[in-house]
Amino acid sequence: TVAMTLTANLAIKRWGIHADRVGNIKVVRLTSKLIAILPLMWLINLNPVWLFFAQLLSGFAWAGFNLSTANFVYDASTPGKRTRCIAYFNVLSGVSLCLGALIGGWLALRLSSSIFTYSIMNIILISAVLRLVIAYLMPFNIKEVRDVEKIRSHQLVLSMLKIKE
């Protein structure tokens, strides 16, 4: 848990610099795909060292996603409606989080051990699949509201990792 928090705190400034340059939606598209594969990392290996690195990736991805979604709401709303838009965003996020947890808990009690030994692992797989579907479908319906530099996703990753500026 600490690995995720520390990584998020270290990565957030860098995500902000890149989001300003390439746009919030570009960062959301990239990080939503990274977030979608995070549950799969918990299914691949339960070794604590592996999970430590999974948490590092989690902090990296969630920092960019959270920052860019919030900044997009600021960019896309007019000053007079900004407070209302932020409230809508937070309510929808909170309700979605709550519903996801409730449905996951409900399924945990009812889902058989069909693929994995434990039903919770099946729920983790379902979570990953649903996240991937959303990550590939949802962000393409949203357009950037300001002029930004065009960059390919792999170039953004390399730039974020300081391999290429």
Image (tube, rainbow, N blue to C red):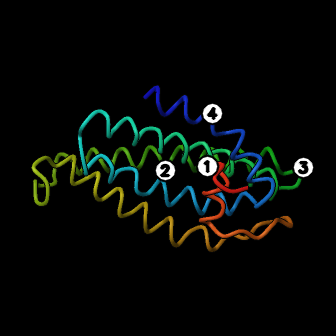
Disc nearer the start of the sequence (4/1): 4
In depth, the one of 149 and 85 nearer the eye is: 149
Residue found 80% across the figure and 50% down from its top? 74
User: Going by the image, does 14 lie left or right of 98?
Assistant: right
The residue wearing badge 4 is 10
Q: Which element is circle 1 on?
A: loop
Label 3 neighbourhood size at 10 Å, few (<14), some (14-19), many (20+)? few
| Quarter occupied by the N terminus | top left
The residue indicated by pointer 3 is 79
Q: Earlier in the sequence, mark 4 or mark 2?
A: 4
**Inter-mark Cα distance, 1 to 3:** 34 Å
Q: Secondary structure at mark 4?
A: helix
Question: Does dot 3 land on a helix, a strand or a loop?
Answer: loop
**Of label 3 and label 4, which has the lower sequence position?**
4
Q: Residues within 10 Å of mark 1 (few under 14, many from 20)?
A: few
Characterize the local packing of mark 4: few (<14), some (14-19) or many (20 or more) Cα atoms within 10 angstroms. some
Residue 31 percent location from the top left of the image: 56, 55
What's the residue type where badge 3 is placed? Pro
User: Marks 3/4: CA distance?
Assistant: 30 Å
**Residue 5's spot in the image, x, y percent?**
53, 30
What SS does tag 2 mark?
helix
Q: Which mark is residue 96?
A: 2
Q: Position of residue 143 (x, y in %)?
A: 73, 70
Q: Which residue is mark 1?
A: 161
Distance between the Cα atoms at labels 2 and 1?
31 Å
Give the spatial CA distance, label 4 vs label 2.
27 Å
Are discs 4 and 1 less than 8 Å apart at CB? Answer: no
